[in-house]
Image (spheres, coloured by chain):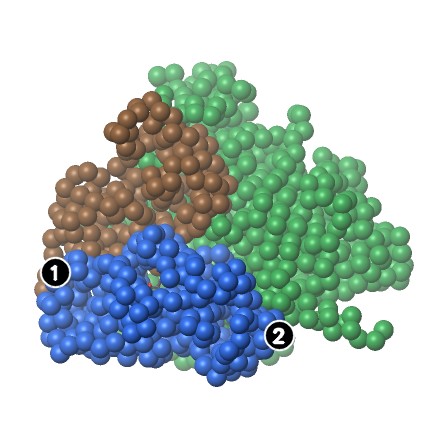
Chain colours: A green, B brown, C blue
């Protein structure tokens, strides 16, 4: 192992400098082809409107336009529900929904041409809140909710047509009525979390061309090359092998560069133009592309006087926006993360994925867990207060341990929740006084079922090439896989190459999401290297992760292994302005086995910092469906000077499996900070914890304590 | 009025480029000169992904009208050669994930260390305030700045005398 | 496509610039540092027919102290093209007007400060900028020049609204004048989100020649100043806690705050009361520390 590890300075003089420090790295936005045109999208200014007429007559002759008529006959797509067409053909469903597109000789010419397209609309009533969208009489977004044949629709989906519900996931464990009857105390609260933007530094970028023999080739920043290929095949009615996806490294993704984004539009333009077409999104368009699900979560939690949990009922409304995208999956994860890592005999969860006239919401680092942990872990502190118990003791009393059954029925193994909680409590001096301190614990599943495969090839010069679809978005996956391969092959890491993934060459992989890549590829690699050692030329390995839940009862295998972690925060509040200062943030994450320590540390630090942004100020604001802060001046993300003292433990165990670290630390961070505020008597239900909300909540406290008992 | 010709020094070489007067330097560096280390994220001067040095000082090329570069010295990360002490420090510490913000960070730190050879952590964080890293590598970037300061000091010790200007 | 390509006008002398400014009037957008102009162009909000840059006019970038005001007190003269960075690092400013140096250092990032100019931030008159409130409280004025001559405009009269000044289309802002004789000066920037954000509430409090001036920025279309409230401090040696609180509350009541992404009107009103009071407390401490004299401020 030690030979493959990068020693500090190892790479500085002997080898080429890293392309990231020289600026030589080429992202999707840097890909160019001779003769290519540049695309620009025409978007709906209405949240819900019938598209009556798209007039391109004032366009210059050298501009190629794509209108609803061009795409009407193409297939519907959607990675989980087939609810989307290449353009909004009949109705535009959110402000920003693409209704037309152009391709021109320069980005500037394309922008100017897009402004010349005239579209007539008939405005229709719209709905923006998920709870309202489920009420009878709410405007209906989609008539048919066909389940996708894309393998991202891997779980039993339960759409409720005519009701704006594209998935209803349930957990039915025990007898909830009886559970609450056994409880000595019951606490109940409703929480809201806002939409948030991934803000990858590199915007979405893609380039498409059609070869002379009618194959489609797409270069795109994507975490899901094979899912993208499946949906494009459906849209164009082509066999999958007629489509080639090349996935250069990305300047950040965090879930935003998944499934079909603009690849279909660009491919249509390229086909019409007979030339390659490239699109690089303007920054404000990112807010119109994919965001995080706003949520409303109601929690009812019952316990015995000694703190033993007996019943928990949770209802989640995940607002998925105009198109489902992977919202059903997010709602499901939100649902099965919401009970928390506790032994609770009676659990009842309903998680709805709801359409509204907002931009689509999809995968976002944390994948539903951020919302669920906020609600679940804030409620644990409400209960602790009600019972007069130490929030840490309350958690330790109920937390799952090896051999326990989760509410999905599966038996837990390699369980470290208590270790994580104790570690974070120790690091923020929990036992020296709890004022201004808070903690939270997280359980998050890995995508199950899924499949990963890898090919390792021996080259003539004694080096090796790894062919694998894992996307590189900064998480260091390519390097980690190279290191694992080098370790198993017994060669220095420099002798293992990792070319940019190309679906024509690499074997199938589910997708680079859910922090599963290193884990799954690591396992597949063992077999691939074994085969290669046998034949000296080529090895193929595959890792299949089996399981799944019954969507009507939530029983089965939610995850073959669990991401586990805890966070603790210490805060100070300026009581006069409500300004919250996080003094210290600590997380403890179960890492199993760490392959590449600097990359693991970076992933964890990045997760914590993103959690801090979600806790303190990240929030997309809307006015009647219109994003009102679609730029980095009005939407702040954390900067270097915003950081508190940040520390963490990556807990390893000899012989353990690799655990993905990409998104474990994020979800518990806002909840730990919210609980730290609560220790001061300030109970804020909704994220983010803006000074305004904190001030308002601290006033409520004053009023409450001033009121006669 | 047509496009104009703009002259400046890019990474030590004199260049002449065609640009329209209301184009930003970022567009011109990418399109006319093929530089890829200057990148757009915000287009508002906020994030620093488009940072270049203008006469040694960091600026946002996304909001600098290209003709304002006339007669100036422009430095991008391509001009540092790959083994500049700040670049070496970034590699040693592994102070990057996706690498998109890295050139801007490196240039900002280079300019800082030329003015303040041994800044404390607070000073570094403030100097980096306007360089956003969405991957969240800030802790390691601050470490890299400190490491770079040490590497530069070492270099100055090895080549003492008034000629010990920072290498680039 | 027939997009009009703007003319690039780059005069090398002030005289030439004034002549071009008069000739083009509103047709030409003046470019100082160009940070704001650049953003407008990027967002498609500005398609200028001509761009008139002051960058090459060397005579517009300077920092000088003169004993020119009527009272014989020193006067800081800042050329309009002086960058924020040059101002914040000038030993002259750091010594004589430390609050100016520290406030300009709070603006945006070093990158923006390397580019943005003192003339630009005033001519811009963005309600969410820092320097206007401070310069207002310091009693600063600007020199506006046209081929017809020049006039001196107080910052108070210069900024008439959000992005609106009293400059005429044929005028250029050429100089900023900041009087000395300051007994104490404080600037507080309250941010509600990231440390990189613009202010949610900004308070400048200055005592000069025995007079208090409190200006609140970033809360309304233009800097907010209420001489009748400040007059409460008239004739007082310092500003005691009670007076500070009262002035804060009166400012909060007098201002009609706006709502934006950084805070609602309601919230801003709350914060104004607190931040004005705190600014006055800081000012009081400063005055006590310097014995009410002007040791730290020229
Ligand atoms: C990312 C970012 C963050 C910022 N954050 C802050 C902050 O926190 N606090 C803060 O105070 N400021 C902040 N600013 C600065 C900001 O308010 C202005 O962008 C800047 O001060 C303008 O200066 P400039 O020299 O670049 O002006 P320019 O963009 O050149 O000009 C601004 C306007 O004034 C006119 N003009 C300029 N000079 C003259 C002149 N001499 N005579 C007549 N008209 C003239 C121009 O025509 C234009 O309309 C920020 C700017 C950016 C880009
Ligand atoms: S792209 Fe220039 S500062 Fe963000
Ligand atoms: S390394 Fe990805 S943005 Fe900084």
Residue A243 at what x, y percent from top left?
37, 45
Q: Which residue is mark 2?
A: C242
Number of dots carrying numbers = 2
Does residue C72 appear to the left or right of A301 in the view shown? left
Q: Nearer the viewer, residue A364 or A703?
A: A703
Q: Are marks 2 and 1 on the same chain?
A: yes
Does residue A102 appear to the left or right of A164 in the view shown? left
| Position of C9 relative to B55 (above/below) | below
Q: Residues within 10 Å of mark 1 (few under 14, many from 20)?
A: some
Q: Nearer the viewer, residue A109 or C265?
A: C265
Residue A166 at what x, y percent from top left?
58, 63
Label 2 marks a residue whose chain is C
| Position of C249 relative to B161 (above/below) | below
Q: Mark yes or no: residue A281 visible.
A: no
Q: Residue at x 49, y 16 (%)?
A: A490
Q: Residue at x 33, y 39 (%)?
A: B114
Residue C291 at what x, y percent from top left?
50, 62
Which quadrant does the N terminus of chain B fall into? Answer: bottom left
Q: Residue at x 55, y 46 (%)?
A: A607
Q: Which residue is mark 1?
A: C12
For residue C281, which quarter of the picture? bottom right
Q: Mark yes or no: residue A700 visible.
A: yes
Spatial CA distance of label 2 from label 1 is: 55 Å
Is tag 2's residue or tag 1's residue first in the polypeptide sequence?
1
Residue A414 at what x, y percent from top left?
71, 35
Task: Name the disc covering residue A480, or none.
Answer: none
Q: Which quarter of the frame holds ligand 1? A: bottom left
Which quadrant does the C terminus of chain B fall into? Answer: top left
| Position of A674 relative to C164 (above/below) | above
């Amino acid at each position: 192992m030690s030979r493959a590890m990068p020693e500090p300075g190892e790479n500085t003089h002997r080898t080429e400098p890293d392309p990231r420090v020289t600026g030589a790295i080429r992202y999707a936005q840097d890909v160019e082809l001779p003769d290519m045109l540049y695309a620009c999208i025409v978007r709906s200014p209405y949240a819900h409107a019938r598209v009556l007429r798209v007039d391109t007559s004032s366009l210059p002759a050298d501009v190629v336009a794509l209108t609803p008529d061009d795409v009407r006959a193409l297939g519907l797509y959607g990675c989980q529900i087939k609810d989307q067409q290449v353009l909004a053909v009949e109705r535009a469903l959110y402000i920003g929904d693409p209704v037309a597109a152009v391709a021109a000789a320069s980005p500037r010419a394309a922008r100017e041409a897009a402004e010349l397209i005239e579209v007539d609309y008939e405005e229709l009533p719209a709905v923006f809140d998920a709870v309202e969208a489920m009420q009878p009489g709410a405007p209906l977004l989609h008539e048919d909710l066909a389940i996708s044949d894309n393998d991202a629709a891997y779980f039993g989906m339960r759409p409720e047509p005519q009701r704006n519900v594209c998935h209803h996931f349930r957990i039915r464990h025990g007898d909830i009525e009886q559970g609450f009857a056994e409880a000595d105390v019951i606490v109940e609260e409703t929480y809201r979390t806002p939409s948030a933007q991934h803000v990858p530094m590199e915007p979405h970028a893609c380039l498409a061309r059609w070869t002379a023999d009618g194959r489609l080739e797409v270069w795109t920043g994507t975490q899901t090359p094979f899912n993208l290929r499946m949906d494009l095949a459906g849209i164009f009615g082509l066999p999958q092998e007629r489509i080639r996806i090349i996935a250069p490294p990305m300047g950040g993704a965090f879930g935003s560069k998944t499934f079909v984004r603009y690849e279909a539009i660009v491919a249509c333009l390229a086909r019409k133009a007979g030339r390659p077409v490239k699109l690089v999104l303007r920054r404000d368009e990112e807010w119109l592309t994919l965001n995080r699900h706003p949520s409303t979560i109601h929690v009812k939690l019952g316990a015995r006087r000694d703190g033993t949990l007996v019943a928990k009922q949770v209802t989640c409304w995940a607002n998925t926006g105009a198109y489902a995208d992977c919202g059903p999956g997010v709602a499901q994860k939100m649902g099965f993360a919401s009970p928390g890592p506790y032994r609770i005999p009676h659990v009842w969860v309903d998680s709805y994925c709801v359409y509204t006239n907002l931009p689509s919401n999809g995968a976002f680092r944390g994948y539903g867990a951020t919302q669920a942990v906020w609600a679940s872990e804030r409620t644990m502190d409400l209960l602790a207060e009600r019972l007069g118990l130490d929030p840490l003791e309350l958690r330790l009393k109920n937390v799952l341990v090896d051999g326990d059954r989760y509410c999905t029925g599966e038996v837990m193994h390699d369980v470290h929740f208590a270790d994580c909680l104790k570690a974070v409590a120790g690091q923020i001096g929990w036992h020296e006084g709890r004022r201004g301190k808070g903690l939270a614990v997280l359980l998050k599943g890995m995508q199950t079922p899924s499949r990963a495969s890898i090919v390792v090839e021996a080259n003539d010069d004694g080096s090796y090439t790894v062919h694998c679809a894992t996307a590189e978005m900064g998480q260091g996956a390519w390097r980690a896989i190279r290191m694992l391969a080098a370790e198993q092959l017994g060669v220095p890491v420099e002798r293992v190459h990792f070319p940019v993934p190309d679906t024509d060459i690499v074997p199938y992989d589910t997708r680079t999401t859910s922090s599963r890549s290193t884990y799954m590829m690591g396992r597949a690699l063992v077999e691939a290297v074994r085969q290669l050692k046998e034949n000296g030329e080529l090895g193929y390995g595959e890792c299949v992760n089996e399981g799944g839940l019954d969507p009507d009862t939530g029983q089965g295998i939610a995850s073959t292994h669990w991401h586990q972690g805890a966070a603790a925060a210490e805060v100070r509040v300026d009581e006069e302005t409500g300004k919250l200062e996080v003094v210290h943030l600590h997380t403890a994450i179960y890492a199993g086995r760490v392959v590449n320590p600097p990359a693991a540390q970076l992933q964890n630090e990045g997760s914590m910092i993103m959690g801090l942004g979600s806790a303190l100020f990240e929030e997309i604001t809307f006015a009647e469906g219109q994003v009102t802060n679609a730029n980095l001046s009005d939407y702040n993300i954390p900067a270097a000077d915003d950081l508190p003292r940040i520390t963490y433990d990556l807990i390893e165990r000899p012989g353990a499996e690799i655990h993905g670290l990409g998104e474990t630390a994020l979800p518990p961070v806002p909840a730990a900070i919210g609980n730290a505020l609560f220790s001061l008597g300030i109970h804020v239900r909704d994220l983010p914890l803006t000074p305004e909300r904190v001030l308002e909540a601290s006033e409520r406290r004053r009023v409450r304590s001033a009121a006669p008992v | 009025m047509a496009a104009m010709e703009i002259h400046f020094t890019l990474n030590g070489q004199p260049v002449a480029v065609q640009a329209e007067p209301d184009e930003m330097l970022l567009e011109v560096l990418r399109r006319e000169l093929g530089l890829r280390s200057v990148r757009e994220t915000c287009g508002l001067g906020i994030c620093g992904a488009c940072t270049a040095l203008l006469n040694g000082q960091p600026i946002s090329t996304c909001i600098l009208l290209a003709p304002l570069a006339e007669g100036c010295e422009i430095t991008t990360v391509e001009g540092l050669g790959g083994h500049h002490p700040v670049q070496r420090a970034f590699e040693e510490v592994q102070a990057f994930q996706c690498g998109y913000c890295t050139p801007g960070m490196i240039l900002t730190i280079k300019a800082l260390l030329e003015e303040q050879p041994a800044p404390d952590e607070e000073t570094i964080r403030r100097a980096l305030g306007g360089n956003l890293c969405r991957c969240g590598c800030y802790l390691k970037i601050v470490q890299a700045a400190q490491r770079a300061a040490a590497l530069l000091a070492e270099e100055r010790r090895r080549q003492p005398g008034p000629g010990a200007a920072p290498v680039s | 496509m027939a997009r009009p390509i703007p003319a690039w006008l780059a005069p090398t002398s002030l005289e030439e610039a004034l002549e071009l400014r008069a000739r083009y009037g509103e047709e030409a957008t003046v470019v100082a540092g160009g940070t704001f102009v650049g953003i407008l162009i990027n967002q498609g909000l500005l398609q200028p027919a001509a761009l008139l840059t002051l960058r090459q006019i060397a005579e517009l970038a300077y920092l000088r102290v003169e004993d020119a005001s009527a009272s014989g007190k020193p006067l800081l003269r800042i050329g309009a093209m002086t960058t924020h960075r040059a101002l914040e690092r000038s030993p002259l400013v750091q010594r004589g007007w430390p609050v100016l140096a520290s406030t300009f250092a709070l603006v945006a990032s070093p990158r923006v400060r390397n580019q943005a100019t003192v003339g630009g931030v005033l001519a811009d008159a963005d309600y969410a900028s820092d320097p206007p409130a401070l310069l207002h409280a310091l009693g600063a004025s600007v020199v506006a020049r046209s081929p017809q001559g020049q006039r001196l405009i107080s910052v108070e009269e210069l900024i008439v609204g959000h992005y609106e000044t009293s400059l005429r289309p044929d005028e250029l802002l050429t100089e900023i004048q900041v009087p000395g004789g300051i007994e104490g000066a404080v600037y507080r920037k309250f941010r509600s989100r990231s440390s990189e954000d613009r202010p949610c509430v900004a308070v400048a409090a200055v005592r000069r020649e025995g007079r208090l001036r409190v200006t609140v920025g970033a809360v309304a279309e233009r800097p907010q100043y209420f001489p009748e409230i400040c007059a409460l401090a008239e004739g007082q040696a310092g500003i005691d806690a009670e007076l500070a609180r009262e002035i804060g509350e009166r400012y909060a009541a007098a201002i009609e705050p706006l709502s934006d992404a950084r805070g609602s009107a309601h919230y801003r009103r709350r914060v104004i009361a607190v931040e004005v009071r705190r600014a006055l407390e800081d000012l009081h401490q400063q005055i006590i520390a310097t014995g009410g004299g002007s040791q730290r401020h020229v």
